[in-house]
């Protein structure tokens, strides 16, 4: 048995699975302190289907805490950015494109040091260790508690980042250090931004992970705890402490993975309708299609792994207005006091669903007076807007099946114009928690290789094997690991037949006896 938990802004969903069979599922309110909401969810599972805590083999949690902390500029550690790039790479300093409120929130300091590599691994300049020691002294005096180290083309050669971490760590042993080659992809500013965000969240990550662990062990469960990552795979708690930035998009990703399992479709569009937004993404081979462009997070450009998701302001709490507009504003977590069916005075999408007989929530008599034309027009508007987003997510003329999940998916019709039938599988309301529970372990390589004549096959195999080895090292069962995504892009403006290769391997979690 395993437990999957998804902590959203409004609700905490939990499921108890035996293999892929859902034994119990609950939806509770998310709490400010995190842990009590999770304890309540696990208690709810126990009440619904009594189980022996010792029989649970793993607990998987998806959480929005870290992305919320960044968006709110709250509880971020004083952080320094060290860039190994001189004499090149000095025209745009670290955090140059950040919103000022976030620079202030992390007490942002930056240091430029000699070092860095060319795309083929040659040195731009030798690493100046005396400059690093001087920078470390200044950081210590300034009260810096977390450091982000970025070197030019470090995904090709990470030697300078590793050495810089040793030097700074020796002088500032209590400071958390994040290295860019472990976090972002090729693209200096975006990779550096992702690394600085990660560094700023390190202290909060330790606090949150300890709280999550305590809430699970408090329920008598001794099984290992995992957190969901942006790409639909899992990381253990130690990895989560070091790389909190990897959890940013775990909510929509979990819903999409859950939709794949519940529907049996591994290539489809997934519409996850929550309380405030509808998130639309595309699954390929059971995993979310990843964004190919830089992703902006809280106004900061980054280039770490993120799913290609388009969100629109339509959900169960969306306000409905007389000239028949739905959203984008929502009553959010106040739905149970503001919606008409709960005795409130605000017409919401939930009221429309109840009036149309698609949902049995609250008191249906409170919406019996609604004009049938208004109800029909609102539902048509929702269907048209969602259908438009699904069409925008398609990349080929091939028809794409649509799977609807999330509690608000009752708002969607059984068929969408242009898209065909809508699949609404059993347990659709807790697809996010199911996605967390069935998540697998992954490993990825993204690097520029110089491919000599006649060696392409060998280089490709080397990249794939490294991705497989990383998945196994992260906890995947070796026999189950396979390559699920592979990209090979020649870079014509670089000499030496340079090619960017990205390989992603995924396998089942190796559970202990």
Image: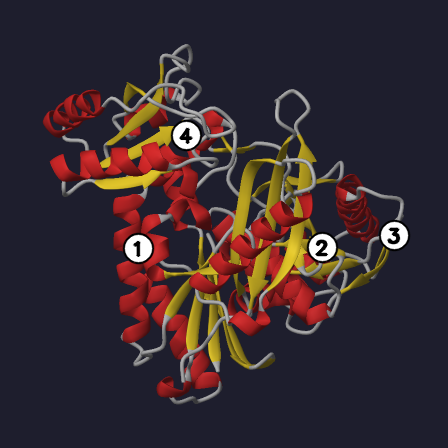
Numbered circle sitting on residue 192: 4
For the residues marked 4 and 3, what is the alpha-carbon distance in whole angstroms?
39 Å
Visible in this render: residue 429? yes
Query: Which residue is at 27% across, 36% downward?
Result: 163
Earlier-in-chain disc, 3 versus 2: 2
Label 4: which secondary element: helix
Residue topped by disc 3? 399
Relative to 332, residue 89 above or below: above
For the residues marked 4 and 1, what is the alpha-carbon distance in whole angstroms?
24 Å
Marks 4, 3: nearer the viewer: 4
Residue topped by disc 1? 208
Visible in this render: residue 278? no
Give left or right: position of 60 versus 196.
Answer: right
Label 3: which secondary element: loop
Instruction: Out of 425 and 478, give the one closest to the viewer.
Output: 478
Earlier-in-chain disc, 4 versus 1: 4
Q: Position of residue 127 (x, y in %)?
A: 29, 24
Numbered circle sitting on residue 284: 2
Earlier-in-chain disc, 4 versus 2: 4
Marks 1, 2: nearer the viewer: 2
Q: Are marks 3 and 1 in contact (CB under 8 Å)?
A: no
For the residues marked 1 and 2, what is the alpha-carbon distance in whole angstroms?
32 Å
Earlier-in-chain disc, 4 versus 3: 4
Query: Which residue is at 60% across, 65% downward?
Result: 431
């Amino acid at each position: 048995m395993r437990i999957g938990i998804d902590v959203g802004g409004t609700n905490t969903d939990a499921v108890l699975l035996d293999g892929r069979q859902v034994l119990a599922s609950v939806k509770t309110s998310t709490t400010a302190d995190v842990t009590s909401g999770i304890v309540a969810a696990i208690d709810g599972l126990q009440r619904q289907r009594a189980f022996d805590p010792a029989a649970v083999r793993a607990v998987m949690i998806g959480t929005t805490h870290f992305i919320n902390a960044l968006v709110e500029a709250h509880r971020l550690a004083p952080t320094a950015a060290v860039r190994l790039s001189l004499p090149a790479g000095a025209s745009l300093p670290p955090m140059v494109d950040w919103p000022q409120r976030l620079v202030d929130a992390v007490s942002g300091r930056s240091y430029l040091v000699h070092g860095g590599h060319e795309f083929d691994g040659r040195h731009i300049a030798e690493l100046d260790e005396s400059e690093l020691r001087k920078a470390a002294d200044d950081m210590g005096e300034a009260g810096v508690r977390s450091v982000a180290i970025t070197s030019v083309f470090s995904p090709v050669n990470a030697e300078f980042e590793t050495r810089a971490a040793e030097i700074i760590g020796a002088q500032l042993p209590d400071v958390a250090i994040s290295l860019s080659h472990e976090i972002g992809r090729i693209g200096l500013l975006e990779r550096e931004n992702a690394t600085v965000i990660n560094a700023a969240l390190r202290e909060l990550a330790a606090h949150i992970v300890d709280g999550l662990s305590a809430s699970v062990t408090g329920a008598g469960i001794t099984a290992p705890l995992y957190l969901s990552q942006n790409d639909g795979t899992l990381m253990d708690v130690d990895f989560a402490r070091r790389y909190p930035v990897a959890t940013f998009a775990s909510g929509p990703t979990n819903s999409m993975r859950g939709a794949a399992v519940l529907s049996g479709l591994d290539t489809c569009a997934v519409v996850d309708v929550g309380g405030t937004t509808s998130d639309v993404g595309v699954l390929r081979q059971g995993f979310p299609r990843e964004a190919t462009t830089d992703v902006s997070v809280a106004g900061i450009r980054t280039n770490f792994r993120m799913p290609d998701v388009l969100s629109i302001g339509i959900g169960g709490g969306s306000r409905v207005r007389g000239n028949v507009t739905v959203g984008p504003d929502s009553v959010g977590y106040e739905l149970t006091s503001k919606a008409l069916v709960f005795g409130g005075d605000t017409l919401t999408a939930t009221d429309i669903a109840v009036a149309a007989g698609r949902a049995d929530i609250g008191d249906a008599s409170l919406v019996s007076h609604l004009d049938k034309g208004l109800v029909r027009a609102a539902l048509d508007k929702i269907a048209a807007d969602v259908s438009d987003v699904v069409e925008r997510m398609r990349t080929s003329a091939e028809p794409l099946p649509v799977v609807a999940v999330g509690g608000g998916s009752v708002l969607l019709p059984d068929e969408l114009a242009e898209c065909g039938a809508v699949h609404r599988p059993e347990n659709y309301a807790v697809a996010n928690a199911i996605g967390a529970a069935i998540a697998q372990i992954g490993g990825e390589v993204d690097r520029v290789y110089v491919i000599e004549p006649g060696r392409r096959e060998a280089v490709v195999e080397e990249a794939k094997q490294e991705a497989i080895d990383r998945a196994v090292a992260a906890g995947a069962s070796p026999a189950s690991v396979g390559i699920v995504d592979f990209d090979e892009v020649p870079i014509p403006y670089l000499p030496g037949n340079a090619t960017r290769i990205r390989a992603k391997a995924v396998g089942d979690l190796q559970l202990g006896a």
